Image (cartoon, coloured by chain):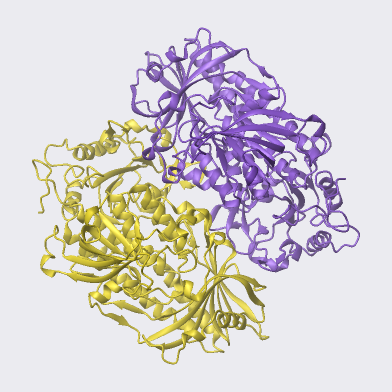
Chain colours: A yellow, B purple
Amino acid sequence: MDKENKFTQSQTDVLIIGAGPSGLMAAYWMARYGVNARIIDNRDTKVFLGHADGLRARTLELFDSMGFQHRVIQEGSISTEANIWVPGPQGNIIRQAQIDIFRVDESPFHNTRLNQGRIERFILDSIREHSDLDVERSVIADSLEYDEELSNDPNSYPITVKVRVLGEDDSNPPCGQEIENGSEAAGNVVNRSNLLPDDWADLAPRKKPQRTQVETIKAKYLIGCDGAHSWTRKQLNIPVEGSNTDHIWGVIDVIPLTDFPDIRRVSVVNNAAGTILVIPRERGLVRFYVPVQTCEAGTTDRFDRSKITRELIRARVQAILAPFIFDFKECSWWTVYQVGQRIAAQSTKDNRVFLAGDAVHTHSPKMGLGMNMSMQDGFNVGWKIALAVAGTLKPEVLETYASERHPLAEMLLDFDRHWSPMFTDRKPGVADTKASEIALIGGRFEDFADGWKVFYPASSLVRKAEDNAEFACARHMIPGERVRPVKLRNQADGGALWTTRVLESDGPFRILVLAGDIRNPMQKQRLETLARILAGQSGSCISPLSRYLEIPGRFKSPVDVLTVHASPWKEVELFDFPEVLRPFDPMKGWAYDKIWCDDACIFDRYCDGRAYEKWGVDRVLGALVVIRPDQYIGWVGELGDVEELTQYLDGILVKKSPTNGVHSVV
Amino acid sequence: MDKENKFTQSQTDVLIIGAGPSGLMAAYWMARYGVNARIIDNRDTKVFLGHADGLRARTLELFDSMGFQHRVIQEGSISTEANIWVPGPQGNIIRQAQIDIFRVDESPFHNTRLNQGRIERFILDSIREHSDLDVERSVIADSLEYDEELSNDPNSYPITVKVRVLGEDDSNPPCGQEIENGSEAAGNVVNRSNLLPDDWADLAPRKKPQRTQVETIKAKYLIGCDGAHSWTRKQLNIPVEGSNTDHIWGVIDVIPLTDFPDIRRVSVVNNAAGTILVIPRERGLVRFYVPVQTCEAGTTDRFDRSKITRELIRARVQAILAPFIFDFKECSWWTVYQVGQRIAAQSTKDNRVFLAGDAVHTHSPKMGLGMNMSMQDGFNVGWKIALAVAGTLKPEVLETYASERHPLAEMLLDFDRHWSPMFTDRKPGVADTKASEIALIGGRFEDFADGWKVFYPASSLVRKAEDNAEFACARHMIPGERVRPVKLRNQADGGALWTTRVLESDGPFRILVLAGDIRNPMQKQRLETLARILAGQSGSCISPLSRYLEIPGRFKSPVDVLTVHASPWKEVELFDFPEVLRPFDPMKGWAYDKIWCDDACIFDRYCDGRAYEKWGVDRVLGALVVIRPDQYIGWVGELGDVEELTQYLDGILVKKSPTNGVHSVV
């Protein structure tokens, strides 16, 4: 970006519109890959209170790979059960069921609630650790032009976005994008006393230019993360499809004064007066979701929003929790919003402009999944675009964003269509049958929400077995699914870490060498044969580690290697492993973080030596797996299958030209 | 403090000199209790690199109670084994022993290394969260006067310290306190690239006044945390006692280039060329402690410090690790220092001036314990002074600082006297016998270092059983020792937390009601009888919860209550417990964080329902325990022993006057 011309015209490789959770996740990858990118937002500060709050275990696994799950766990509120309350025999309400929503041994993390503002804080801090990329706030996008004729040239700038950088003189509210519902309008007060110190600096709006200025930004790629009323989507004339009705919801975050016994547990409460969802949160807060009304999509006929007040929501909660008392004096945030189950017809325009998060899918808030899906969208599209811009990923792989994420958005809406009426169409007197239905749908939904049923279809990035069968050598390593988390012991230092952290989201694809038991001489020999190929010493072919174009300024190779062996930790040494698996760097010495051991250790009950078992891998023979930069499994084979592995990578990554390492699109 | 007179004369309740780890720990308590205090330091910035780095599990337990252990765990490097290397048969060195230094089930935490600068960061952040107290840097103490005649009046200001606040015009180095060895002098470079972003703001020295200014500070209490060459100690003419010899050590933090297999494991390596200690650290660093020379205490005869260079240290490490190769290109920090085993004759002057940390005890660095002992000193003295200044703690209790901490300093030196010669007096050829000695002494030392043998003697704060026997009702709850950490389930929300976090270091004494199994009607009745007394409803006496003077502005009572029951979590409800155990606040509602359950839960392998067993408490009958603000056990009894409990508290805390709650020193 040319500083001199900033207020007239500039170029960037990637422009992200919207700095909510999905936009920030995409920006994280720009920071990690060192890509020339910008991220703009029409709001003048980040979010501080309220908004989304539900975090699924799967999302925490991603946060672990990004380096900040520990902050979420320290501050957040977890839940492991969900309770169903229904009318009792004497006009009271009774706890009908207590459902375990935690799956033993499936994830190191629990479903957690923490407000969106803190999540934004953590991602922003992580971005700052890796680059100078920062959110440009009070920037309004005014127009978008897209030149289709340039779409096939990856080095072209087919996107032109005109933006206004709001100055002190601009007293108009932002109008390029619709303002998110809620917040100040509802009288929510943000100040130092209800924020943690690390958010104080963001409390004051940034210093603005004196006058509003106009800038024309040319971009290679654009990611629209600008919410349910996405401005980007509208500029592209992408229609949204879905229900003809909207639901009006009231939401309050309060410190409750109540004798309802499950106020600190996730609960669905329904009686003749209606149904509410009770969601305990951090710092003593509890959130209540209260369905208020249904109306025709996009209209507010029969619905006067000004009539929905905090007092009305309070009264609704009181009526539904009765005969338990309910009240509050402290309300940290509240809002009213109108939403239907809808999905954008496309998530991309020519794989140059992408939509992510609420810009693609809207649904009821009660699944505690919206922010998760949105962040995973941003995570998925982010690494792909960054790696494509770097010249390392073949541009056609960008097609997988839509093929991987769009079907999930459809599944999400499908669940919501079953789930939402439990709340909005409730009839008095059928409470108990409804409750069991909630439990049933809820159970199936959890499978999906926690990421076990989130598999990506076959594509250049996902090499499935024939008939979608499992691979015999690694039966529970399913291409298109995530790696099942296990705790491993580092061979060099003996410390135990979850794979969610070991498989850091730092950029490269990873060849996971499941070396088996190298005390077995045959197996040691197999490993050494593999190592010779990886080291480029086999003569016949170029190593997949040195075959592909580097990520400029960050990684010499977009393919890294990580070894997990199954010998007892004390019976082998780091230097027993071939050098290519623990390569030497003239500044950093040997790589001590690349050889891991699946062995139980007495000092950590979770480091139980069951990784191979959980992954369905033979402890002697091992296997070979490729993990994508986003921790999804891309390819599975045996230790000897390097040729097939290379074919897989050839389909994704740009090879160096044989002589000088120069970009050669094949 | 009167702002107008700041540069002439001012008053503060507590003045802390030195903002290293011990001073910051004391300052933490000032922040938590809201005490009027100041903390000054002669350096112009915090520490960033190098310096102390060893953290014991016990220290992490304290950090958990302060709310930031998760940051240490995320960044630090842990170790669970220590290795002994000795000369082998062919002129090589071999691994003779691998010693487990982790004790299963004793602590949730492991021995961890992280540089002092990060620890200072975390404590500073924690202080900031609770008050406006901030370190005043570039402030030099010039003189100290102490008026003994005022020592018996707790409201007097017997201490007068004149300080210079260094201004831009002052080009002289600080001279009031001696400058710590190492750092810039040794050519260590600190810049953004080797710091984490949250330290960047502290990298630039604070804005100084234009001219150096002089201020006279009157204080009720003074804590000298000003290091081995303590200026405070010298002003009080407190002699130091101990060895007549000093040892000269070289220390380097480097990214090693080596094929020594245990470079990422704690190792003692000795051969004919000498002995070194290898300590792996965060971010790929490894620290080497290299004994260089011995000389007469306080002198540098036969020792020219300028001759000890980084190159000399490199060469020593190379010689000792040979035939393994060793070198480095990146050195983050190095220093040379001279130290002997010495202890101050007293840790206090009239219990108005206190010394803590290195100002009291100096010893060799190789035990990885110095920073821990120093922080625990500051932690111990901090809460006592703060609570005394608040008028809530009887001033005579301050005597327990010396009686609790001084004997430990002596133990520490005693260990060092046995331990240090292993390194400094090594003779070639006796390596293997020495090694087994190291293992033996090391093993006994670990007991002490990890806090199991850190018990405080009987005092007003520690009510021991006769003959120091255990109490039958809580056999492993030993007054004067810390609470053995266990993981408990919160009754209200079902989440599992370690007691190290539940017993937050937030100020009050805690009555720990081990309620037993309340499904048993007899036991329920016993609990209700106790609750009536605690609620002040028994008629005969004032509840210990409302009997003592408040902590002004922070807590209505310096005594809080926490319940841990042994009924199955699903079989009781929060509201089954008497109200006084989960009191109602008109703003915050019922207290949901005060009733905990000792029950196993499927979602957490550490929440195993073994708390009562580990504490030696009967699951039906329970017990009653008082936990001091620093998590040490003060008193143990049965559920019915409220009268004895009150006697214990009466000996420590100042009672309200019966009519108006006004301070009445008894």
- Is residue B198 rendered to the left or right of residue B145? left
Q: Residue at x 54, y 67 (%)?
A: A81
Which x, y percent locates residue A270?
Answer: 56, 81
Which x, y percent locates residue A41?
Answer: 34, 65
Residue that lies at the very extreme toward the bottom in this rendered image: A302
**A549 above or below B521?**
above
Residue that lies at the very extreme toward the left in this rendered image: A659
Q: Residue at x 40, y 73 (%)?
A: A180
Q: Can you see residue B475?
A: no
Q: Quadrant of the N terminus of chain A?
A: bottom left
Q: Quadrant of residue B141?
A: top right
Q: State the residue in front, B662 or A484.
A: B662
Q: State the residue in front, A640 or B37.
A: B37
Q: Quadrant of the C terminus of chain A?
A: bottom left
Q: How many marks?
A: 0
Residue that lies at the very extreme toward the right in this rendered image: B540
Which x, y percent locates residue B646?
Answer: 84, 50
Which x, y percent locates residue A130?
Answer: 34, 48
Q: Can you see residue A198?
A: yes
**A5 above or below A328?**
above
Q: State the residue in front, A186 or A267.
A: A186
Q: State the residue in front, A337 or B44.
A: B44
